[in-house]
Image (cartoon, rainbow, N blue to C red):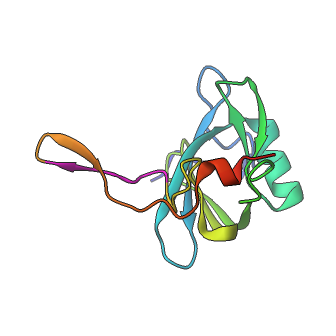
């Protein structure tokens, strides 16, 4: 039995944390690779649904953040799923340009633990200075 109530309003069925946030995992639809993790609030989730591209909440800047607005690396939404408890979202996305990370890599999850050391395991596909030259 799950804790998500499918009969509640779609936003009310979710379990928001004390700050009104829910974790969101973005997964590239074709490859299945997890490309990033971010937070969403009600407004960012509503805007994501309305525009068809991922919109997150930046806890650092305390504002909405449309993924790709500066880099051009938008995340087109294929589907949005919630886990059984309704406290985590999984966004299946088409990662435009193949780069999700601000470091110029395919995924934000590029560090690999090798022994007792974190090592960058994925190449930089594009220099961030070129991506954010605006």
Residue 46 forms part of the magenta stretch? no
Identified at 74% across, 53% down, the residue is 71
Q: Residue at x 50, y 45 (%)?
A: 85
Residue 60 in the image: state x and y as whole percent: 65, 24
Q: Is residue 127 above or below residue 18?
A: below
Magenta-span inclusion, residue 109? yes
> Is 49 left or right of 38, judged from the image as shown?
right
Q: Which residue is pictured at 67% across the width and 44% down the height? A: 13
Estimate the x, y position of residue 56 in percent, counting from the top left.
71, 42
**Residue farthest toward the right in the current orientation of the protein:** 50
Residue plotted at (59% across, 47% down): 102
The stretch of residues the image draws in magenta is: 108-114
Quadrant where the C terminus is found in the figure: top right
Residue 79 versus residue 12: which sits nearer the camera? Answer: 79
Q: Residue 84 at x, y = what percent? A: 49, 53
Can see residue 95?
Answer: no
Note whether 32 is above or below 131 in the view shown. below
Residue 1 left/right relative to 118:
right
């Amino acid at each position: 039995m799950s804790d998500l109530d499918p009969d509640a309003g779609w936003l009310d069925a979710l379990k928001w944390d004390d700050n009104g946030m829910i974790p969101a995992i973005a997964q590239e639809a074709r490859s299945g690779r997890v490309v990033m993790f971010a937070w969403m609030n009600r407004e960012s989730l509503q805007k994501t649904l309305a525009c068809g591209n991922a919109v997150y909440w930046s806890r650092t800047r305390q504002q909405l953040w449309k993924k790709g607005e500066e880099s051009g690396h938008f995340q087109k939404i294929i589907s949005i799923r919630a886990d059984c408890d309704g406290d985590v979202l999984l966004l299946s996305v088409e990662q435009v340009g193949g780069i999700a990370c601000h470091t110029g890599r395919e995924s934000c999850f590029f560090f690999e633990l090798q022994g007792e050391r974190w090592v960058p395991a994925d190449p930089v596909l594009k220099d961030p200075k070129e991506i954010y030259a605006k």
